[in-house]
Image (cartoon, rainbow, N blue to C red):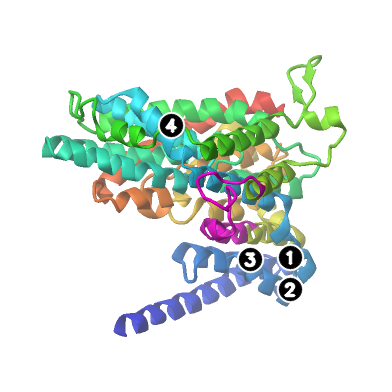
Amino acid sequence: MESDKGSGRRVYTLAAASVALAALAALLTPGAADGSLAPRMTAVAVLMALWWVFEVVPIPVTALLPLVLLPLLGISELKVVSANYGKPIIFLFLGGFLLALGLQRSGLHRRIALSIVALIGSQPRRLVLGFMLACYVLSMWISNTASVMVMLPIALSVLSDIRERSEEHAGRLGAPLMLGIAYAADIGGMATPVGTPPNLVFMEVLGDLFPNVPAPTFAQWMIMGVPLSAVFLLAGWYLLAWRLFRLPTEAVIARGDAVRNALRGLGPLTRDEAVSGAVFALTALLWMTGSDLNLGASLRIPGWRSLLGIPGVGDASVAVAAGISLFLIPSRSRAGEALMSWKATRDLPWGMLLLFGGGFALAGGFQSSGLSAIIGGALAGLSGLPVVALVVIVCLVLTFLTELTSNTAMTTLMLPILAQAAVALSLDPRLLMIPATLSASCAFMMPVASPTQAIVFGSGYVSIRQMARAGIWFNLLGIAVVTVAFFLLGVPALGIRL
């Protein structure tokens, strides 16, 4: 009872303090004296940021505040605000999660992960690489958290198997293996547009604020994202396995290890696994080939939308159609059921969909209130800096700010500000927004920075000190890799003028 009272007092105190700070921020915003809308929007943004950082209420609940505050303060009408919670990008995310859940229900994701780990080998450094590679591949297509949840039981089983023979070997391998799983999931999410929520937030915010600026197609994003993330993964593995930790030097598990035993226990590929995998592969292929691919001034490969004359069918339509198909295809392993059931959708991250909507509503409020223009004007003084320096600063700020709260919340707050800053600096908005989006996936120091890190921290094999020590190196590595890869691959692939 006392703990409940203490918890309640904490919530009320944080709520009251955040309201007071939001009001103070509004008073300090230009235009506060003449009744303009920008100071009111400042108060909303500061209030939401504080509630997200300190989790005064659950993060998705905070995302509902624009539905109340923006109409109440006269910033936007309710019908305008509510439209943000039903944007196509939200349904793309919903369809993608249905596909990922279909893979999980069939068990194919586990077979893929075990096969990759078994293929790499049992020497300690190879073992870390195998788990990282498996998690990396999975998190390109399913949520980072789900990828870690797939790999964690397998890793714990391997460590338990090792501990029976050598307590020392298990102790020395545990931290790098756990950190490798968490970090690889976040890195893999950078590779595709659907790999992690910030990527989709960027797509929608760019389309809303700059309808004439082309967003990256699925293929264009992967041209940049896959090499970027692959280099990051291998460099990160080198740090974990060769520099930051002293791993055992000899093979630590025999050929009849827990991984191979688990793989044999799955038996042959089932029909449900094959069908769900085929649906997933077809969907990914349609995502990658829907838009025209320009390979030069005179070479263009038309996408299926152009060939079929259906330009209005977007990636969200493809994702939802694939998700619906899972409810229609009968399951062989579950008598009387389809590959997907409505009961199973309870495991979908419905709160994330609300978080998307709240972020888009926040971005719209920045624009309609004029707050974006005020912020952009304040940042115009940075015009003397080289573009590369600006990108490095953006990557640095987003990386370390994301240590404090979720990457989705941080991108929804920062992308509208960076968009207006780019306008004030006469830059292509993608020059600042894409590096910021990628850097939001590069916070590796603290358990609170990402659910993946919180999960592996709970395993007991990783201390805060170990995570912070490894994480600072990964943070700095991420800033460097994102900056270099963006200019080498992203800028030419997207045709961005510097």
Measured as percent of width and height from the top left, residue 135 is found at 42, 37
Which residue is denoted by mark 3 in the rendering?
42
- Secondary structure type for disc 2: helix
Q: CA distance from mark 2 to mark 1?
A: 8 Å
Whole-angstrom CA distance, mark 3 to mark 4, is 58 Å
Q: Nearer the viewer, residue 435 or 498?
A: 435
Callouts 2 and 1 close, C-beta under 8 Å: yes
Residue sitting at the far top: 298
Which of disc 4 and disc 3 is earlier in sequence? Answer: 3
Marks 3 and 2: in contact by CB < 8 Å?
Answer: no
Q: Nearer the viewer, mark 3 or mark 4?
A: 4
Circle 1: residue type = Val
Above/below status of 250 relative to 479: above
Residue 402 spot, x, y in % from top left: 47, 50
The residue that appears at 36% across and 51% down in the rendered structure is 455
At label 1, counting other C-alpha atoms closer than 10 Å, the crowd grade (few under 14, some 14-19, many 20 or more) is many
